[in-house]
Every structure is written in structure tokens, then in C-alpha cells.
């Protein structure tokens, strides 16, 4: 619908689709309303095109539609955390940092102080952890969400955290600014549908064995449920080489950006699994057109309950931020500066 379409005009379009036996879903994308249907309505396009308030009817040909550059040629922007939050996909390069897992209030305060001092634009931290082994730390769950929310109010920075089951989506959406769908769940279609319907922006990680096509179709599920706030995250794919934890596919960043209008960020921590590679890959990601980074930081990596082997210390993170700035500026971007930043005690 056009941006100035009235509720009445939107309701009229929904009614027209229902008359054709369809069950339309309403979504929001860049300030305009999307009316989405599961199937095509033979002959409906002509009727819809002439309805007042309709800007465009996108024909249901081809698997990738809403996420495609054919749907929107310009880069889309995803705002996270309201007017004082961060915008991904615009001129600003957004660095998201924090521990792999939320462990305790002290741990969170220490890590958050370090990343905020170094200029992070958003915070990360897993409360629900999808661990390969059932014997590994599974995350603090709901208690972890509360600790994360505490850091959000303390700093004013938006937070992203992973959701692993459809039943938890509502709760995680209430207590965070952005939902993360992890590599192991990229094709969990029930989870994608629920996250898509949540109204919260979603950070969609690439499946470790997923093609770019499959990744974009997973993003299509989210947009198809009316979610206009989708951000892709390249986090490495499986290869034969065990020298790094995964193989960071930076060509996928440029290719995804060619095919879609969605912002793309890079996770140099999970992809490489090695702190000394996080800096070089962060700079390379910025150089090849990524819109931001997702970096694991821990102030006591040896004691970390999850993925300590890949975490940067606060000082290492600050060093990466310093080296990142000229690269970001060389490609015509600026490091995103948080607007509201305070550091109250907990
Ligand atoms: C994470 O970011 O905490 C995580 C588990 O990442 P991935 O899904 O990419 O393994
Ligand atoms: Mn991790």
C-alpha cells in the first residue's frame, strides 16, 4: 500500500482478497503497509491495481519475492530499539558486541562496560543457547533475559538475543529489541513464522550448511509473515578445513547484497573461532560491503561458560574498533554512534 493509504483503503484491499478466497496477512515495511497472501488469486491483480491506496501489486512468480531487489531496488533500513536505537542498512556501520552467553550480572556489567567504552552500538548475549552437546551450559533462560534487559536500561543500547523455540518468541520479543535466529535453526520454519509474526526485527544467521538461496528463502519466510525488519548474518559455513571453526564466506555478503535489499552483517567470532582472526575479518567484512558486525567479547574468556576460545578481551575489542574506523570510512560509511548512552550502575 502507499505510505498514505488509509485504514479504510487497507481494509478494502483485504476484503477484495478475502472475496477471492485468500487470507491476507498485514505487515509493515519501511513505514508502508504490506498486504501479503499465501497464494496467487487468478485475476485479482487487475482489481487490486485499481483499488485506491494500492502502490504496487507484486506478482507471485519466483520463490524469492519480498526480499528481492526486484521488490525494492534500494537498500532497506532496519531500525532496532526505537528512535534512540540503531539503524542497520543505512550509512551507519553497526557494531554489536557482548558475550556469547549471559552468565551473571557481574559478567554482563563487566563486558558491557568494556564494549560501551569502545563504542559498540548494540549489545548481544544469549539467554537461550542452542548447544551441540546436551551436557554443555544451556543458558540462563528467562533469568538471562532479565539480566540482558537490565543492561539495556543501564546503557540505553538495543539488545539482540537468540530465540530457539516458537513458544519463547513472545517472551524474548518483550524483553529484547531484536530476535536472533541461530545457524542451527535457520530452517526451523515454525520458529521463522512465529518470529516473523512477532513484529520485532530479526537477525537471521546463515545455516552452517545452507546455500545463499536457502538463506534468502528463510528470510522470505520472515517477510512473508509481515516482518519488514530482517537482517541477514553471515557466520561461516562448514568446509573441510579445521584450522578455523567454520569458513567465513565473505563472497556471500556481496552476493546477498546483490540479490536482496536486506542489510547483511558478519559474525567474525563464530565463523573463525579464533580471536586473532576476528580483527582481520572484521575489517574485510566492512570493506566488502557488510552493514555491521556481531562480535563475542568476554572479560574473562578462560572462565566463559560458552565459546570462550573465540571471545575478544575488552582491550582486543577496543583495538578492533580503532582499526575498523578508517576502513568503514574508506567505503563511504561511518561507525554508528549510539545516541543515548548512559552507564548507570545496576
Ligand atoms: C551465537 O551467536 O550465540 C550463536 C550461537 O551463533 P550461531 O548460531 O551462528 O552458531
Ligand atoms: Mn557462541
Image (cartoon, grey):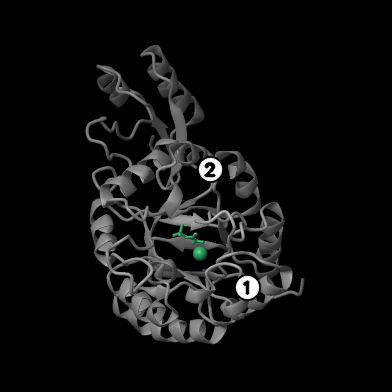
Q: CA distance from mark 1 to mark 2?
A: 25 Å
User: Is 237 rendered above or below residue 300?
Assistant: above
Q: Residue at x 44, y 17 (%)?
A: 15
| x and y percentages locating residue 81 in the rendered image | 57, 57
Q: Residue at x 63, y 58 (%)?
A: 139
Q: Residue at x 72, y 56 (%)?
A: 143
The local secondary structure at tag 1 comes to loop
User: Is 245 rendered above or below residue 146?
Assistant: below
Q: Circle 2 is placed at which residue position? A: 199
Asked if the beta carbon under badge 1 is closer than 8 A to the nearest atom of ligand 1, the reply is no
Residue 90 seen in render: no
Nearer to the camera, 343 or 44: 343
Quarter holding the N terminus is top left
| x and y percentages locating residue 33 in the rendered image | 44, 37
Q: Is residue 4 left or right of residue 299?
A: left
Q: Circle 1 is placed at which residue position? A: 341
| x and y percentages locating residue 46 in the rendered image | 25, 21
| x and y percentages locating residue 218 in the rendered image | 37, 44
Nearer to the camera, 148 or 226: 148
Quarter holding the C terminus is bottom right
User: Is 225 rendered above or below residue 282?
Assistant: above
The label nearer to you, 1 versus 2, is 2
Q: Pointer 1: residues within 10 angstroms few (<14), some, or many (20+)? A: some
Q: Residue at x 43, y 69 (%)?
A: 293
Q: Earlier in the sequence, mark 1 or mark 2?
A: 2
Residue 208 image label: none
Amino acid at each position: 500500500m502507499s505510505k498514505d493509504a488509509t485504514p479504510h483503503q487497507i481494509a478494502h484491499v483485504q476484503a477484495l482478497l478475502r472475496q477471492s478466497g485468500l487470507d491476507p496477512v498485514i505487515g509493515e515495511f519501511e513505514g508502508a503497509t504490506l498486504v501479503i497472501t499465501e497464494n496467487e488469486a487468478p485475476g485479482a491483480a487487475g482489481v487490486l491495481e485499481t483499488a485506491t491506496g494500492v502502490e504496487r501489486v507484486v506478482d507471485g512468480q519466483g520463490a524469492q519475492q519480498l526480499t528481492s531487489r526486484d521488490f525494492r531496488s534500494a537498500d532497506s533500513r532496519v531500525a532496532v530499539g526505537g528512535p534512540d536505537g540503531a539503524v542497520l542498512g543505512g550509512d551507519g556501520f553497526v557494531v554489536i558486541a557482548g558475550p556469547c552467553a549471559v552468565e551473571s550480572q557481574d559478567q554482563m556489567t563487566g563486558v558491557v562496560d568494556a564494549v560501551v567504552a569502545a563504542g559498540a552500538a548494540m549489545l548481544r548475549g544469549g539467554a537461550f543457547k542452542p548447544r551441540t552437546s546436551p551436557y554443555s551450559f544451556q543458558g540462563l533462560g528467562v533469568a538471562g533475559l532479565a539480566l540482558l534487559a537490565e543492561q539495556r536500561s543501564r546503557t540505553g543500547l538495543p539488545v539482540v538475543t537468540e530465540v530457539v523455540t516458537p513458544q519463547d518468541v513472545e517472551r524474548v520479543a518483550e524483553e529484547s529489541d531484536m530476535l536472533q535466529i541461530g545457524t542451527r535453526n535457520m530452517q526451523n520454519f515454525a520458529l521463522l513464522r512465529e518470529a516473523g509474526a512477532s513484529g520485532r526485527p530479526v537477525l537471521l544467521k546463515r545455516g552452517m550448511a545452507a546455500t545463499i538461496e536457502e538463506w534468502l528463502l528463510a528470510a522470505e519466510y520472515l517477510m512473508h509473515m509481515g516482518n519488514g525488519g530482517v537482517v541477514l548474518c553471515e557466520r561461516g559455513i562448514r568446509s573441510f578445513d579445521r584450522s578455523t571453526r567454520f569458513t567465513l564466506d565473505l563472497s556471500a555478503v556481496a552476493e546477498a547484497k546483490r540479490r536482496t535489499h536486506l542489510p547483511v552483517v558478519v559474525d567474525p567470532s563464530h565463523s573463525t573461532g579464533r580471536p586473532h582472526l576476528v580483527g582481520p575479518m572484521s575489517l574485510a567484512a566492512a570493506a566488502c560491503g557488510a552493514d555491521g558486525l556481531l562480535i563475542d567479547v568476554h572479560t574473562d574468556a578462560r572462565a566463559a561458560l560458552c565459546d570462550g576460545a573465540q571471545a575478544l578481551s575488552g582491550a582486543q575489542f577496543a583495538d578492533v574498533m580503532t582499526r575498523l574506523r578508517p576502513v568503514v570510512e574508506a567505503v563511504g560509511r561511518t561507525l554508528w554512534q549510539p545516541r543515548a548512552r548512559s552507564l548507570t550502575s545496576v
